[in-house]
Image (tube, rainbow, N blue to C red):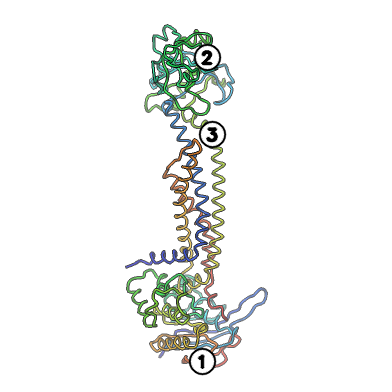
């Protein structure tokens, strides 16, 4: 039997803007197997990013149950959540979010900074990851010296340095041209084939086609599998 | 194996220097007020040291004491009789085993003249031991001796400026007129630095007996300087002397003392009292400016955190817990403090050199000030970074995904 990496049950989330309450998620339930490649699609305001925030432990649901890798996580403290994010989850963002004053290599090593020790082997691993992603000549380049595609590949290397079980991508190709997008998606596909579970949020059907499974969210609930 | 602390520091410095203008302003804000604080504090210490050196030069070290005739406040008019301190009192005090030396003084301001030049000057009747009591010796000639005393000789020893004042060359052996009587000059004293209005080099010394019988015509003295043996407890000495004098002057109960005892500590406090008031005032200004620096740092830190919010959110998303974020900014502010503390200290030394060039104050080097500078810098910087750092630690990582 395949292990469930993510189990969400009746997740709700409401945002309050002034006196107006806006329910973004209206009881979402989701199960993601290990080794899955899931694309969540939806229009803006559909709640897909909020859902990804909750799965990524960046936000807490108002109600519902979230079990990540066999552990109930909705009641954990900020520190415990930080620990889990660091160990189990890799993030790839639309706007890359590389630290502007750090080199590609330093950016990749950043998650390990919050672990305790960075040793020579970690550095070797980071260099290898960058090589694997075709960035062997850009190891000491700063983000502003890199193209968008290169920056996103650095960000992927950063997500992978911690050997996460789960890779979360929020519109990973949103800021890229079509050629770079293809490259990035091929990397994702390869990673997934090597066993990493990926959950990706996108509104681009072409990009979503790279995933094994597509779910569409509308007005805070899934409408189709 | 590298520890991540080194990496952690590298990360902090890179962030700090990524916005150089912000850093320079935080640094300047702190440094300028530290220079002020250090300079004011150092000059205060320096002035106090100068006073101490001056007193030490007068042999008014910690084993000395002055008794002045007449009771009352230390500075100001006497409120009791002032003709009660007698040589017999001194004889009695000399019997105390801790008293090494007693040098009584009878003093008055008299008209002194030489060949038509007349001046009102301070004339002191003293004993031969005056030179030892004050560490002050003749440059030429000799000081008053026992024979002069016994014979009530009309001889005098003059301060270093006297020959110039009266335009006398080869003053030894010349006769100057003091209160209408001729005195033969037997010696000229070494020059003594003056402080305030005590112009030592313009004084004239005559034998105490001559002064009492032939000049002032009085049997009391104005004061006595006492030197104690090493290790004497000045408090106990003061108490014993007080007892003797009160008993001899028949003062009982609540009757006030008709003498004043001045200890070196008291003398320093008199000299430095005014200075201290000014110093407290200036220090207050320096502290206010330090607070302003703190507020500036806080402001710039808030701006910095605002600007770096996505990076902070990223750090949190990647697994930095709130304490790591706070630590990050506190270490940053500590670094700013250390840099400012050291630079502020060095600049204040330069500033003091400049000040000492234009004023009588001397530049003063002190590790105490260095430590003070560092501690104030650290305290201000860390205190005022605390709030922004806490704010930073509360940034929601979810803002990274605010695409909806």
Callout 2 secondary element: strand
Tell me the residue that label 2 is attached to.
B112
**Frontmost residue, A196 versus A64:** A196
Q: Nearer the viewer, residue A79 or B284?
A: B284
Which numbered disc covers residue A206?
Answer: 1
How far apart are the two marked residues, 2 and 1, measured between alpha carbons? 115 Å
Chain of the residue displaying label 1: A
Q: Closer to the camera: disc 2 or disc 3?
A: 2
Residue A203 visible in the snapshot: yes
Whole-number angstrom distance, CA of label 2 to CA of label 3: 34 Å
Disc 3 secondary structure class: helix
Q: Is residue A43 above or below residue A74?
A: below
Which of the labelled discs sits on residue B316, or is there none?
Answer: none
Q: Nearer the viewer, residue B362 or B93?
A: B362
CA gap, disc 3 and disc 1:
85 Å
| Callout 1: SS | helix
Judge whether residue B227 can be spotted in this image. no
Residue B146 location, x and y as percent? 39, 11
The image shows residue B110 at horizontal and vertical percentages of 54, 14
The subunit letter for the residue under badge 2 reads B
- Residue A32 position (above or below residue A112): below
- Towards the viewer: B298 or B354: B354
Q: Residue B16 at x, y = what percent?
A: 47, 63
Q: Which callout, 2 or 3, points at the residue further toward the start of the chain?
A: 2
Tell me the residue that label 3 is attached to: B273
- At x 58% / y 79%, what residue is drawn? A13
Asked if the residues shown at circle 2 and circle 3 are in contact, with their CB atoms under 8 angstroms apart, the answer is no
Q: Nearer the viewer, mark 2 or mark 1?
A: 2
């Amino acid at each position: 039997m395949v292990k469930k990496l993510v189990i969400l049950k009746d997740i709700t989330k409401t945002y309050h803007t002034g006196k107006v309450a806006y329910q973004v998620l209206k009881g979402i339930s989701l199960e993601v197997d290990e080794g899955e490649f899931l694309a969540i699609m939806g229009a803006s305001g559909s709640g897909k990013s909020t859902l990804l925030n909750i799965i990524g432990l960046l936000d807490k649901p108002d109600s519902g149950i979230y079990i990540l890798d066999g552990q109930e996580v909705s009641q954990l403290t900020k520190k415990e959540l930080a620990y889990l994010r660091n160990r189990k989850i890799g993030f790839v963002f639309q706007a890359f979010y590389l630290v502007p004053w750090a080199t590609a290599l330093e950016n990749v090593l950043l998650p390990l900074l919050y672990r305790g020790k960075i040793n020579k082997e970690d550095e070797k691993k980071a260099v290898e990851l960058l090589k694997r992603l075709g960035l062997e000549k850009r190891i000491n380049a700063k983000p502003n010296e890199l193209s968008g595609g290169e920056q996103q590949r650095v960000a992927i290397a950063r997500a992978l340095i911690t050997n996460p079980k789960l890779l979360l991508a929020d519109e990973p190709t949103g800021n890229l041209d079509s050629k770079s997008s293809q490259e990035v998606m091929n990397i994702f596909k390869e990673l997934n084939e090597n066993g990493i579970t990926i959950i990706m949020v996108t509104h681009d059907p072409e990009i979503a086609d790279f995933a094994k499974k597509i779910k569409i969210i509308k007005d805070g609930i899934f409408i189709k599998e | 194996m590298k520890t991540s602390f080194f990496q952690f520091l590298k990360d902090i410095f890179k962030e700090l220097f990524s916005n150089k203008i912000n850093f320079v302003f935080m640094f300047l804000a702190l440094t300028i007020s530290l220079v002020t604080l250090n300079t004011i504090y150092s000059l205060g210490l320096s002035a106090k040291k100068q006073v101490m050196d001056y007193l030490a030069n007068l042999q008014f070290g910690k084993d000395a004491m002055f008794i002045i005739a007449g009771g009352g406040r230390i500075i100001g008019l006497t409120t009791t009789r002032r003709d009660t301190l007698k040589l017999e009192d001194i004889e009695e005090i000399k019997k105390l085993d801790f008293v090494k030396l007693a040098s009584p003084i009878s003093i008055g301001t008299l008209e002194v003249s030489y060949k038509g030049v007349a001046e009102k000057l301070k004339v002191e009747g003293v004993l031969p031991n005056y030179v030892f009591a004050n560490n002050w010796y003749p440059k030429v000639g000799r000081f008053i001796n026992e024979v002069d005393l016994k014979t009530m000789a009309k001889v005098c020893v003059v301060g270093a400026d006297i020959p110039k004042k009266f335009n006398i060359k080869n003053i030894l052996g010349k006769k100057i007129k003091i209160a209408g009587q001729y005195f033969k000059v037997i010696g000229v004293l070494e020059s003594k630095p003056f402080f305030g209005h005590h112009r030592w080099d313009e004084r004239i010394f005559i034998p105490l007996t001559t002064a009492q019988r032939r000049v002032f015509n009085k049997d009391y003295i104005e004061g006595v300087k006492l030197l104690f043996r090493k290790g004497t407890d000045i408090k106990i000495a003061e108490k014993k002397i007080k007892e003797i004098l009160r008993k001899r002057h028949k003062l009982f109960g609540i009757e006030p003392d008709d003498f004043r005892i001045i200890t070196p500590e008291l003398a320093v406090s008199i000299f430095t009292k005014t200075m201290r008031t000014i110093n407290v005032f200036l220090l207050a200004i320096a502290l206010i400016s330090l607070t302003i620096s703190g507020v500036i740092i806080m402001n710039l830190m808030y701006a910095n955190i605002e600007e770096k919010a996505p990076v902070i959110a990223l750090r949190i998303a990647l697994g930095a817990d709130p304490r790591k974020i706070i630590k990050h900014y506190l270490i940053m502010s500590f670094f700013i403090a250390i840099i400012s503390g050291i630079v502020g200290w060095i600049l204040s030394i330069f500033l003091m050199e400049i000040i000492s060039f234009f004023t009588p104050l001397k530049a003063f080097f002190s590790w105490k000030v260095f430590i003070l500078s560092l501690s104030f810098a650290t305290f201000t910087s860390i205190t005022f970074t605390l709030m922004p750092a806490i704010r930073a630690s509360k940034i929601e990582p979810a803002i990274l995904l605010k695409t909806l």
